[in-house]
Image (cartoon, rainbow, N blue to C red):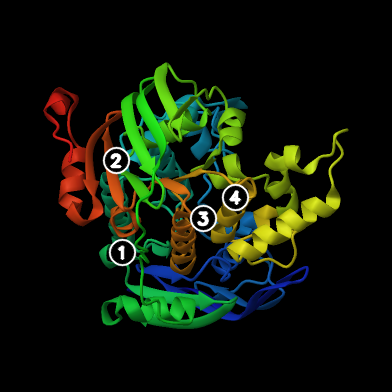
Amino acid sequence: MGQYIVELNHIHKHFPGVKALDDVMFNLKEGEVLALLGENGAGKSTLMKILSGVHTRDEGEIKIYGEVVEELTPKKAQELGIAIIHQELNLCAHLSVAENIFLGREKTQAGVLSNKEMNKETELILKRLNIDIDPTTIVADLAVSKQQMVEISKALSIKAKILIMDEPTSALTSSEVVDLFKIIHKLKAEGCGIVYISHRLEELQHIVDRVTIMRDSRYITSMNFAETGMPEIISNMVGREIKEKFPHVRCNRGKKILEVKNLTAGRMVRNVSLDLYEGEIVGIAGLMGAGRTETTRAIFGADPKDSGEILLDGKPITINKPIDAIRAGIVLAPEDRKKDGLCIKLGVQDNIALPNLDLLCNKIGIVDKKKEKSMAQKAVSNLKIKLANTNVDAGTLSGGNQQKVVVAKWLARNSRVVIFDEPTRGIDIAAKVEIYNLMNELKQQGIGVLFVSSEMPEVLGISDRILVMCDGRITGEFPTEEATQDLILEHATKFESKLDQVVYA
């Protein structure tokens, strides 16, 4: 590793009513991978937005390649070789891969757009990274994992030497993560300095040289990763020791709440049968594309069903759309909470009220504001949602608190079944534990909890029972005490020709 290519000294940043950065120090060396860690709301994203020119600092000094930079705009940052890959992908879905990579820097000949030249250069960039994507492919037709690779290629097309990756593996399968790590090692060997932001701490051992930790808008410490234990990293991140990573509460299993029989919905849900009891959490494991999310959406009525039956408390119910499920007492906290679970431009109180207007309106359809405020305040108190007041925009909250708001609006209805799809994606370790505790509390109240997760330790740590899906079907079912990662993986990779041989636990 070489000299410092980034030095941020005594950086301060304020937003209205919020101190986002308080005297923060940060540096990055040539040819190193630096993990920038901290809980949601620690200031990581704000600091990186200052480095990439999106935000301007209030105070402090920025040095790039040893030179002081007074004004850093996105254009200036790009000219200096700084590129950021955001957690929410920043691509134009209707354009081709090549058009996205050269957006704003289009190649022309005699004033006419030269798609041929852009396609050729894109092909060279993709080849350099061993990425097998046709430059002419429309981005909307690519899987999210491939779109992530396009984002990386876009950053490298400007010859970036300082690359910021924000949660780059959140939507990748394990094999795609391996491919990404190969790219990271290749870029590191070429002298690129990489800032890696991730809540998946188990990934760090494969790529990281050094760790910088932030907490409560402040710089805490920097450490060589090889000389640091994970408990020390976590303790510095959260300011306390987390004794139990996967808190699990034992409950007596009650009566059967939910039963799904022979559910089929499109290509991704085929003849799925499952049940759920009071006092238990059932986890659904499987690889990406196994049909887990599609199954939850079909149960909730978000996607149409071809056939199958759903019973609640032993009685058949008809669910053709989400409102049918909601009224029956079956609710879903979706995978993409910002897109499908919240109105991020509305306040928390409005978000909690929206699906409960039938409970809040009088006979002539006017909302009882007093009742609405009481409902929101009770939900915030019960779920320990951290916010200044219930009128703050939902989009300003941390990921863990956003997830709590999604659940809060459903619990106001006394729901019987709560389905979580990737409930801890993109949130920090302390917030994850809060979500696990929330799931345990629901279980203790006799609410049935069904959840999908791509993190196998999470499924093993929180579930009472585990279902495994592959190719749109349930291929295994185990009590958690009998399950292992190898056993889950074996059933998650069964081929369709072997499905008839599956032995259910």
Residue at which label 4 appears: 411
- The location of residue 107, given as percent across then percent down, is 54, 33
Residue at which label 1 appears: 202
**Crowdedness near tag 2: few (<14), some (14–19) or many (≥20) residues, C-alpha within 10 Å:** some
Residue 44 seen by the camera = yes
Q: Say which label, 1 or 2, has the lower sequence index.
A: 1
Disc 2 is placed on an element classified as loop
Separation of residues labelled 3 and 4 (CA atoms): 38 Å
Q: Say which label, 4 or 2, has the lower sequence index.
A: 2
Q: Quadrant of the C terminus?
A: top left
Q: Nearer the viewer, residue 196 or 472?
A: 472
Separation of residues labelled 4 and 1 (CA atoms): 33 Å
Q: For residue 287, which numbered disc appears in the image?
A: 2
Q: Amino acid at mark 3?
A: Ile
Q: Amino acid at mark 4?
A: Leu
Marks 1, 2: nearer the viewer: 2
Marks 4, 2: nearer the viewer: 4
Marks 3, 4: nearer the viewer: 4
CB within 8 Å, label 4 to label 1: no
Disc 1 is placed on an element classified as helix
Marks 4, 1: nearer the viewer: 4
Q: Determine whether 179 is above or below 401 in the image.
A: above
Can you name the residue that lies furthest to the top here?
A: 306
Separation of residues labelled 1 and 2 (CA atoms): 18 Å
User: What residue is rendered at 32% in x and 29% in y?
Assistant: 273
